[in-house]
Amino acid sequence: MKDIVVFIPALDPDRRLIAYVGELLKAGVENLILLDDGSDDEHKLIFDELADRCIVLRHPHNLGKGRALKNAFTLISEHRLTDTVSYVGEGKIEDKLAGIKEAACVVTADSDGQHAVSDVIAVGLKTEELGDALILGARDFDSENVPFKSKKGNKITRTLFGILHGLKLTDTQTGLRGIPVKLLPTFIKGKGERFEYELDMLVIAAAEHIPVVEVPIQTIYENDNGGTHFRAVADSLSVYKILFGTFFKFLLTSLSSFVVDILVFRLMLAIFGGLSEELKITLSTVIARVISSVYNFLMNKNVVFLKEGDMIRSAIGYYTLCILQMLASAGLVIVVHRVLPIPETYVKIIVDSMLFVISYQIQKRIVFKR
């Protein structure tokens, strides 16, 4: 276990953390890091008690799990402390970094008793074995001991994540993860300071085509998950902001492109006011559609999907998709209208809404693939 670092962030843990640390050390974990995320004075003593058995870090006040993870990733990959974290213990942190400098991967675990030591070891070994994949310790949410809120929340999130980001996962909310050290700089750039950061790690993995492998683990919930610090409303909103972030930008870009199209159309009508009605409308429509499509292309490439380079190839893919989408829209409206007694306008709204979602997926996965 010399090549594996285990990291555990905690806020106001009980004394079970001491026993848990002992079990990890007994199981062969040699590089163990704890982070006190702003615990009160009473619970700080637990970390002080463990400072001679592992590396203990501390936030001056509660900064959130996301910040704790990023601070740990920085220490493990860059061998330095960030400004928001301090070292607890005698001597210098550098004196305890010898083993960490040689580590190949880090395993993150929770302090609330949800992760069995054997599962922590299994995730670490799988991460070390594969070397280039993000490993998730996946729980079985069909188990009877899973709280209703956790079961429903995870199933909704994993379904939406699969639709929006193209990764079919069993457990998107697991805190037991294995990350190769060479991938830490990529994940450090993730968004979020609290629980939403863990979801953004998965968004990054999907966008960067980092393999994600799930390892089945025990499904443990103690006291109906009463020890969690997850804020039902605030943290859920942050999580779904990350989940829908790219799609919302895609939607807003499409709406703004529509506004550009209308404004340019109105401007062209004024400019070509002396022409015949048919020619004026035709020219205005074409010019407005060209300008709005170029605007939409550039926004999707540079703002929504953050695609660098490949301007010509991306443009060819984008406009090919536009033509195919237009033809598909017309064809489907004709077919559906003939089969079902629904007005053409309603059919077009339904068809174009479906094609809009499909277009998002194609642009994300093919046209502007990073």
Image (cartoon, grey):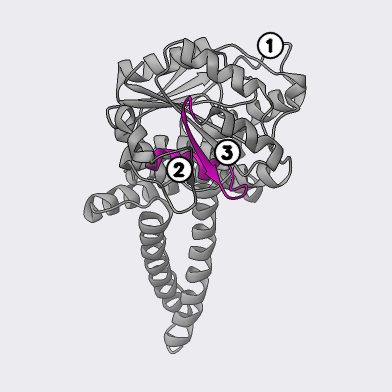
Q: Are marks 1 and 2 in contact (CB under 8 Å)?
A: no
**The N terminus appears in which quarter of the rendering?**
top left
Query: What's the amino acid at mark 2?
Result: Lys
Query: What's the amino acid at mark 1?
Result: Ser
First in sequence, mark 1 or 2: give its number.
Answer: 2
> Measuring 69% from the left and 18% from the top, which residue is drawn there?
221
User: Tag 2, which secondary structure?
Assistant: helix
Local crowd at mark 2 within 10 Å, few (<14), some, or many (≥20)?
A: many
> Measuring 22% from the left and 54% from the top, which residue is drawn there?
312
Q: Position of residue 264 (x, y in %)?
A: 46, 76
Residue under numbered circle 2: 70
> Measuring 65% from the left and 17% from the top, which residue is drawn there?
141
First in sequence, mark 2 or 3: give its number.
Answer: 3
Q: In the image shown, does 152 or 68 lie closer to the viewer? A: 68
Q: In the image shown, does 341 or 33 lie closer to the viewer? A: 33
Q: Position of residue 73 (x, y in %)?
A: 40, 38
Query: Rounded to the nearest whole Å, what is the CA distance between mark 3 and mark 1?
Result: 31 Å
Residue under numbered circle 3: 36
Decide if residue 333 is in sight here.
no
Query: What's the amino acid at mark 3?
Result: Asp
Look at the image and say whether residue 285 sits in the magenta stretch: no
